[in-house]
Every structure is written in C-alpha cells, then in structure tokens.
Amino acid sequence: MAGIVIVGAQWGDEGKGKIVDLLAENADLVIRFQGGNNAGHTIVRDDVKWKFHLIPSGILYPGLKCAIGNGVVIDPKVLTGELDDLRAKGIDLSGLRISANAHLIMPYHMLLDHAGEARLGKLQIGTTRRGIGPAYADKAARLGIRVQDILDPKILRQKFETALAEKNRVLELVYGAEPLEIEQLAERMEGYAVRLRPYVADTSLLVERALRAGQSVLLEGAQGTLLDLDHGTYPFVTSSNPTAGAAATGIGIGPTRIDQVIGVAKAYVTRVGEGPFPTEIEGSAQARVRELGAEYGTTTGRERRCGWLDLVALRFAARLNGLTSLALTKLDVLSEFDEVPVCVRYRLPDGSETDEFPAHQSDFHHARPVYEILDGWRDPLDGVEELAALPAQARRYIEYVEAALDLEVSMIGTGAERERVITTRALAGIAGGP
Ligand code: IMP
C-alpha cells in the first residue's frame, strides 16, 4: 500500500506538477484533493508545453487513472474546456474520474470574487478572481451546488432557488449587479452535465480500493502551505487547506492510509498576490530571479514576487505537513549568483530572534530575515544528472537545507524539462517503496 501526498511547501508555484508528473510514472492513480482552477501548472514533454488547471497532469500517461477529489472546487466551464482540449490532442480520457461530491464554481462566485476584491480596495487579497473563495464559502454555508446536483434537473432547480434567493439579493443590493435567472443557469449547467456525467464517480471508494489492492496512489495538493486557510498568512491565503492533513478529507480516506508526504519547494521563494513576505529580495536581484525563473503566473500571468530561500518558513511547512522528504526545484535559477543568501532566523520587532515561524500575525508581518550567505556556483547545471556531478557549492546548498530542516532532499530540479530532475535515490523508493 502506498498513499503519497504531494504538497507545496511555500506559497504555491513550487513546481508540484512536474514532481507529480515524474512520480506518476510509477503510480496507478493520481487524485487532486483541494483548490480549483486558481492552480495551474505547465508540463514540458518532448518540447510540447501542456497547461493544466484542474485535471492532474498524470492524464498524459496512457492507462493511469486520474481523479478530482471531493475537496476540489470545479468550474465546469474550465473543466469541460480542458477535456475538449486534451481530447483534441488525442489524449485518452477514459481513466478520468470526478467526485460526485465536489462543489462547483458558479458564475455568481466569480462575480462575487471580483466584487469582493474591488470592495476591499487597498486591502485586497490579490485573489486569482476565479471564484474560489465564494465557492468554498457556499460549501461551508451549505448553499453549494455539487457535481451530483447538476445530474438531476429537479434537485438542481431546488438548489438554485435556495442559493439564488441569497446571491441575487447580494448582487443587486450590495454590488448593484443584475440578478441571475434560475432557468438560464440551470440549462447551462445541464449542458455541462451531459459532458461530465461519464466521469462522475465515488472517488473515495476508488482510492480506497486502489490502496487495498496494493497500488500506488498520488494525492496531489494545489497552492502551498503558507496559503493554507488555517495555518497560512491569513487573510492573504486561499480558501482551502493545501496542507497534507486535508488530503484525507479532500479525498475521503483515513489519515492512516497516507504513507509518505513529499513537500515541494523552490530553491528560492515566490509569492503572488498581497501579503507579508520576509525574504522578498530588495533591488535589482529580484527582477533577475524573476527573469531567470520565468516567474509569471500560469493562471493569471501576474508577476510573481521573488525572495531568497526562507528556512524558517520551510521548517514550519515540514512540521505542519509531517514531510517525509523534500523536492527542491529550480536550483538552476540560482546559478547566476556569486552569493546565495538563505534566511535562517527572523528578527522580531522586540529585537529577539527566532527560528520558529511566529504564531502571531504582527510578529510575522514585521519579521526581518537574518541571512546566512552561502557561496554561489556560477556554473550552469545543464546536463547534470546526478548529485555527485553538481558543483560543490550547489551540493553544499542542498546539504545546508537538509541539515537546517533535518529532512532529506530526495529530488532536485535543474531545469524546465521533465528529465531535468536529479533523484537522490530510486523513484520507486521516494514514492514509498523500501
Ligand atoms: P484565491 O485562491 O484565488 O482565492 O487567491 C487567494 C490567494 O492565493 C492569492 O494570494 C493568490 O495569488 C493565491 N493563490 C491561489 N492559487 C495559487 C497558486 O496556484 N499559486 C500561487 N498562488 C496562488
């Protein structure tokens, strides 16, 4: 049995897609457990770029099952668009399953996301404006529309009546927007239902059965630990839990089914949207990292803010997720620098220093990074296929991270193409084998 969770250990965009893609080679099933199309990743295979927002990239492997778990919020327009696109490119979709219990993002969720951000003005969160927060809010308020609801016209209209009674009042009275028509919305959803119906399944049972049969299942998270609704830099967070604990509820398996938790972190840090970011680089080096790392969002195209590696935050991520190993991506981006700072402690407003992530928001908002300056390597990492062939300073960088976190770095990303990942032991071993 091997249930392997893959989570982002920073603020998202760590390159999880690529790591999942690599591990999927030895897996039987890949399933996403939270988030929605606020996520996005690009996979480069044989010089072809693939962009995914909802469907796990494992779909590119013939015969591998891919699923979207109940914890994900699905925009049916985006999902059907992604299906059409993959089908047009000749990808076999017969192994795809979608949880009947996943909630749907409705057009009013998007309107409310836009309107909410506009209302916050300078205090805005910088959401992806994909309707993620309002959809999760409705799930908690028990006003949500689930995948299974659109398969039954009578239930769908009942649910819309309840939901729109509230949404239309908010849209009209608070935002001065046009109310939405139940019938129009229901018809649109029924159009999606026809296309999604063949894939709808009890994905919780699917995963349980796979695990019982001794298969290897990848449980794929979106976003990252510091965007976690409970543990991240609230309110500058997403509206779900990207941490490993949520994999159990977002899929419908017990936590005892999880064997490994692999965290994915960049060799530096990026953040999109607003919110505190202690190691954000000052001066021109930030733009340099952005250019070298092509740090622009897959989903929104926004410039990502760039910072030096933050070991305080990463140790926090290791703890919250119970990481069993770390994949460190984009090490090649740092090849241009003579010196590479890593943040080892925070200096707090009262002058004290800590290597633990501050529990109080004011401490974190005012934390100043204390850096250890490591030597850069100045050598490109092209063609480096094993740990021993890395420049000595790059190896030292990895060892430094391992010692600071007391955690093994099991994979090292050295470029965009899928083969440019150094694995420190056999992939099967990283993914739960002996
Ligand atoms: P939301 O998830 O669209 O509500 O956005 C909330 C916060 O999470 C914003 O700061 C977004 O930029 C951030 N966010 C959401 N999804 C991602 C992601 O996949 N990568 C990086 N940041 C994300």
Image (cartoon, rainbow, N blue to C red):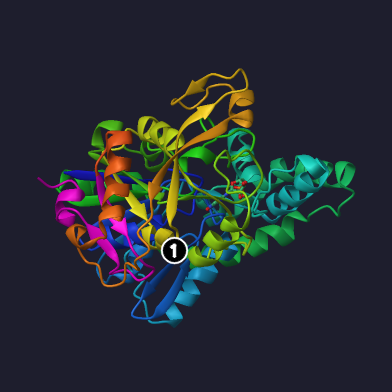
Of residues 4 and 425, the one drawn nearer to the viewer in this rendering: 425
Q: Is residue 379 magenta?
A: no
Residue 380 placement: quadrant: bottom left
Q: Magenta includes 418?
A: yes
Question: Based on the displayed image, in which of its 4 quarters is residue 2 positioned?
Answer: top left
Give x and y (percent) for residue 321: 37, 34
- Confirm or reject: label 1 Cβ below 8 Å from ligand 1: no
Horizontally, residue 403 falls left or right of residue 85, namely left
217 sits left or right of 315 in the view: left
Question: Which residue is labeled 1 in the image?
Answer: 336
x and y percentages locating residue 44 in the rendered image: 39, 73
The answer to whether residue 119 is above or below residue 94 is above
Magenta stretch? 409-434
Vertical arrangement, residue 322 with respect to residue 330, above or below: above
Q: Is residue 199 left or right of residue 154?
A: left
Residue furthest toward the left? 434
- Whether residue 213 sits left or right of residue 117 in the image: it is left
Residue 110: percent from the left, percent from the top? 70, 53
Task: Return the residue nearer the eye: 216 or 177.
Answer: 216
Counting from the top left corner in percent of width and height, residue 19 is at: 33, 57
Q: Amino acid at mark 1?
A: Glu
Residue drawn at x 17%, y 58% as measured from the top left: 388
